[in-house]
Image: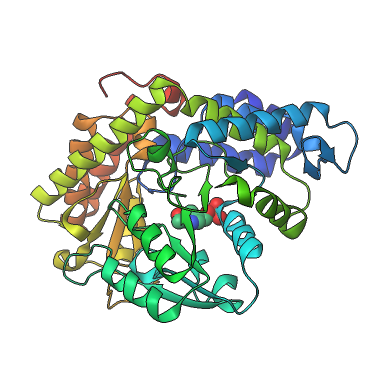
Amino acid sequence: MDENGLREVRLTDPEIAAAIAEEERRQQDSLELIASENLASRAVRQAQGSVLTNKYAEGYPGARYYGGCRHVDRVEQLARLRARQLFQAEHANVQPHAGAAANLAVYLAFLKPGDRILGMNLAHGGHLTHGSPVNITGRYFEAYSYGVDRASGLLDMEEVRREAALIRPKLLIAGATAYPRRIDFAAFEEIARAVGAILMVDIAHIAGLVAAKLHPSPVPHAAVITTTTHKTLRGPRGGAILCRRQYARRIDQAVFPGLQGGPLMHVIAAKAVSFKEAQQPEFISYQERVLENIQVLAEELRGYDFDLVTGGSDTHLLLLDLRSKDITGVEAEQLLESVGITANKNAVPFDPRSPRVTSGLRLGTPAITSRGMGPEQIRLIARLINEALACRTEEAALGKIRQRVCELCRAFPIDQVKKVPAGG
Ligand SMILES: *Cc1c(COP(=O)(O)O)cnc(C)c1O
């Protein structure tokens, strides 16, 4: 990937250079099926590795607390403009260091400690920062959760309505981290309005699909939208907030000086580059291939008798319930890692096992699609997953699977990230 870019690191710090080089090899030689990961382009990584890391720019364009900000001002203005255009939003803040920071800024903007929030249950696919008891959001606010229907695995909008009417939260949160189906933002809007709650939608996972208009946008429905920039959106690791004009000042104040100090201008430059990439027609066809690939993966895995939570997917990810395969999530994760397939264990709704063990596995197609893989490769990957689980203790067979994974990876080097074939 960046062999030459490491020359200086190698001279200064051989230990770190070695770890980076080995990580690069790991990425090259393994199949990345973690649904929240992706492969940022060289352009994004160059911007992120630029001298902009040297600059302090507390404040916002035109109103900084430091001198020498004229160039970084242009960077942030472009990033904000492109974010607004990409999502047709009235206001964008591109300074949050991460998705979690974006969410915290929204809480800071709208809530006082002890206020009530209502978000999706972490154990049903929600995110830690939506009020989990182990997170600051569950400790500083009075947090309640809604979940999915036990039989269908689908979001239970009746439960959301009931809980919202009972709890009367100040903030209603929609969005998920391990939910494979579309979320009905209009229904959330209606519930929020009925109970006088502010609606926040967290599109950290699906932002790329929303930008490509392959998932309905929450922008017309929510007061405020948070996202990461590094998942399906394929930018640098970071966060962003979109909101209505009337909340712009409140959100900006919450991010800085409310929550953060100096913005990461190098990351904001990389966000701007990724937003520009996301405005290109190739980005839409990339997202279409992500969706095509997940459909092929779902169909193939169903063919091998895997149970899919909700029966399938309308996004970039799917959730396997492994109980019928007599293997836990953690065992499957470790087994697949041993053959070069990276995925994460994940609780399934109403999981009898602990979060450290789990009964599920979450799989996503964003990263392998960025490498240019299409249906033919997906069918092979599904077969290799099935074989690995079937012969889990046979070392020789697992060795052969590892070899097939390696060959597949070599045929689709990560350097090709920009040159994905049109037909996938
Ligand atoms: C990934 C994710 C986040 C957190 O993003 P970080 O950049 O890891 O802080 C927040 N919300 C949802 C729904 C996510 O999936």
Counting every numbered tag in the picture gives 0
Whether residue 114 is visible, yes or no, is: yes
- Is 70 above or below relative to 102? above
Which quadrant of the rendered structure holds the C terminus? top left
Left or right: 359 in relation to 101:
left
List x then y, in percent, for residue 208.
42, 38
Q: Quadrant of residue 65?
A: top right
Q: Quadrant of residue 259?
A: bottom right
Residue at horizontal 34%, vertical 70%?
A: 160
List x then y, in percent, for residue 132.
49, 73
Left or right: 5 in relation to 352:
right
Residue at horizontal 25%, vertical 29%?
A: 374
Whether residue 2 is visible, yes or no, is: no
Q: Nearer the viewer, residue 293 or 258?
A: 258
List x then y, in percent, for residue 154.
24, 62
Q: Nearer the viewer, residue 107 or 283?
A: 107
- Is 258 above or below relative to 60? below
Residue at horizontal 88%, vertical 31%?
A: 68
List x then y, in percent, for residue 197.
49, 67
- Give the farthest residue toward the right: 67
Q: Nearer the viewer, residue 157 or 420?
A: 157
Residue at horizontal 33%, vertical 58%?
A: 187
Q: Nearer the viewer, residue 325 or 98?
A: 98
Colour scheme of the picture: rainbow
